[in-house]
Amino acid sequence: MTSPVKRSGGSRLLEHVRVALQVPEGAILPTDQENIQVLARGVRRVAGPLDAYFDIFFQEAQPQNGLTCEMIYWERPEGGRVFNAGAVGASWVLGVDTAFERLLTNVLHHFGVTAQGSEATDKRL
């Protein structure tokens, strides 16, 4: 048994993917969080043959206006920081996309992670 999703205007959670109209039985729609900073948006006007989009309940969804992902940074009110590259496949470009490597190096540096070993290089911008 599923129940209809109640949508509220301006919801961050539902901004980039049109979620399925049903919440699975026993599931709870998460509440929006404050202070999430969108660093970048991934827009794809025409879906590729292998593209697949899912809502937060892993039900099929459709991108809204081509927006397929958002890269975010969030400092949680309870403490802790979150960086989300926005797409499951983001790690696939590590090793071939030097700009993304630098970005991720900067994020790790911001979180206090330092490279160790003789092969470590400082790629920060």
Image: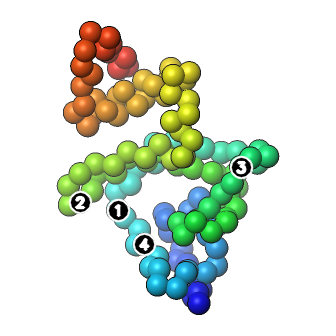
Q: Earlier in the sequence, mark 1 or mark 2?
A: 1
Residue 117, by quadrant, is: top left
- In the image, which disc is placed on residue 51? 3
49 or 34: nearer the viewer? 49
Q: Which residue is mark 1?
A: 34
- In the image, which disc is placed on residue 30? 4
Single out the mark in the foreground, 3 or 4: 3
29 or 120: nearer the viewer? 120
Residue sitting at x 52%, y 85%: 25
Q: Report the residue that reaches farthest toward the top.
A: 118
Horizontal side, residue 116 vs residue 5: left or right: left
Neighbor class of circle 2 (other Cα within 10 Å; few <14, some 14-19, many 20+) is few
Q: Is residue 117 above or below residue 50?
A: above
Asked if residue 19 shows in the view, the reply is yes
Q: Earlier in the sequence, mark 3 or mark 4?
A: 4
Residue type of the residue flagged with mark 2: Pro
Residue type of the residue flagged with mark 1: Glu
- Cβ–Cβ under 8 Å for marks 1 and 4: no
Q: Which residue is mark 2?
A: 77
Q: Is residue 92 above or below residue 79?
A: above
